[in-house]
Image (cartoon, rainbow, N blue to C red):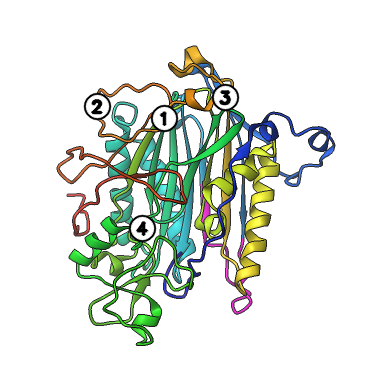
Amino acid sequence: MGCVHGKCCGRYPQSSDGDLRDFRDAGPYSAQRKHILSQRSLEFVPVPSHGYRLEYSLLTQRGYYPDSPDKENQDSFCVSKQVRGNPNIHFFGVFDGHGELGTQCANFVKDRLIEILANDSTLSADPVKSYNSAFLTTNYELHNSKIDDTMSGTTAITVLVIGDTLYVANVGDSRAVIAVKDGNRIIAEDLSCDQTPFRKDEYERVKLCGARVMSVDQVEGLKDPDIQTWGEESESGDPPRLWIPNGRYPGTAFTRSVGDSTAETIGVVATPEVSMVKLTPNHLFFVVASDGVFEFLSSQAVVDMAARYPDPRDACAAIAGESYKLWLEHEIRTDDITIIIVHIKGLSNSAGGATDGASGANNRPATRVRKISESSVTTGSEVYCSVRSDSSEIQSCQLVLSMNRSPAIVVPSPTCQSPVSCG
């Protein structure tokens, strides 16, 4: 969901919970199936500190733009193994560019973000601080690069694996989701929360920074601009967007991004929301994807589809294909689509922390969101999140529940920020 000329905000109906049997054994169909991504090898990376491995694949698909047949894929991705030479640290990221120079912005952030993280000697000791510093420094460097990011930028959803812990940093409306075993079902749990004006905290923050928040119809005078009430979803395909006080730009449908220097003046910041999850044997795989995947598919629907394919190459292809099909059923175009699926293999109770691993739903560790500190130690399927202000203080977290979605991990929003300097 990018600039005012970007895609709509409609949603596809939620699906039911997945069946664990699909993940454990897809039957003879999978044994005879030719891999759709036959030209891409299945990648493996060990995490020796905890005796498990990650198996992953990815796919990126240019969108269908009948009015712009030469438009390039503005999505980008990054997989970096053994960050800082450490065999237990691995990085996965998806970057969804937007605007005229969105491709250049996405590629710039893809390259610089991991470079900055890899050069940070405090990464292992304080991943949250490192993440925040890397995002803000990358944003500053993009502003001062040869790329004109006045009306262009990128969202970023990234997962940093450190031992048996995932650190998820999000800027924008792409998403990370983890699949959790719950008896004979597989439940999708969001590891990030879309940063859009639909969120009350983000809405209030950008309003304090001077943004006008209105849909396109409101800006054009077709609807009452004083009605500042939007549901969690926009069935009309006309979501609330951000505009400067006396103009019809930039029209961003997100409240955080890297780049977008004009939107930054009205509260669009590059400060990431960071969540943390301690892995257990109940965690089967995680998905990192651009919003081209989630526009018409819920988190649960994506996890359901991924669970049906033991090989993540097939899962990537199936989800991308379904996303593409749904776009064309609802619109005359599609968005760019990028997805990374990472299977968690061989994590044992002893290596992965305390959990009973029982099959009953009542025994599945609950997902909990709370304030974290430097010394926090977690067990089970505990999820923590934090964000640091400019004074590096860890702020408390909020839990947001939705009738139609898994619990979202939401952290306090920063106040209106001026561009970061590296003085």
Q: CA distance from mark 3 to mark 2?
A: 26 Å
Q: Earlier in the sequence, mark 3 or mark 1?
A: 3
- Residue type at mark 3: give it: Arg
Labels 2 and 4 touching (C-beta < 8 A)? no
Residue 193: image location, x then y, percent: 39, 49
Q: Earlier in the sequence, mark 3 or mark 2?
A: 3
Q: Earlier in the sequence, mark 4 or mark 1?
A: 4
Q: Is residue 96 left or right of residue 297?
A: left
Labels 3 and 2 touching (C-beta < 8 A)? no
- Whether residue 56 is visible to the viewer of this picture, yes or no, is yes
- Residue type at mark 2: give it: Glu
Mark carried by residue 53: 3
Labels 2 and 1 touching (C-beta < 8 A)? no
- Residue type at mark 1: give it: Ala
Disc 1, SS: loop
Q: Earlier in the sequence, mark 2 or mark 1?
A: 1
Discs 2/1, front: 1
Foreground residue among 193 and 56: 193
Can you identify the residue that label 4 sits on?
Answer: 257
Disc 4, SS: loop
Give the magenta range.
Answer: 62-77
Q: CA distance from mark 4 to mark 1?
A: 31 Å
Can you identify the residue that label 1 sits on?
Answer: 366
Labels 3 and 1 touching (C-beta < 8 A)? no
Residue name at image x 75 percent, y 47 percent: 36
Foreground residue among 21 and 202: 21
Can you identify the residue that label 2 sits on?
Answer: 374
Q: CA distance from mark 2 to mark 1?
A: 22 Å
Disc 2, SS: loop
Disc 3, SS: strand
Q: CA distance from mark 4 to mark 3?
A: 32 Å
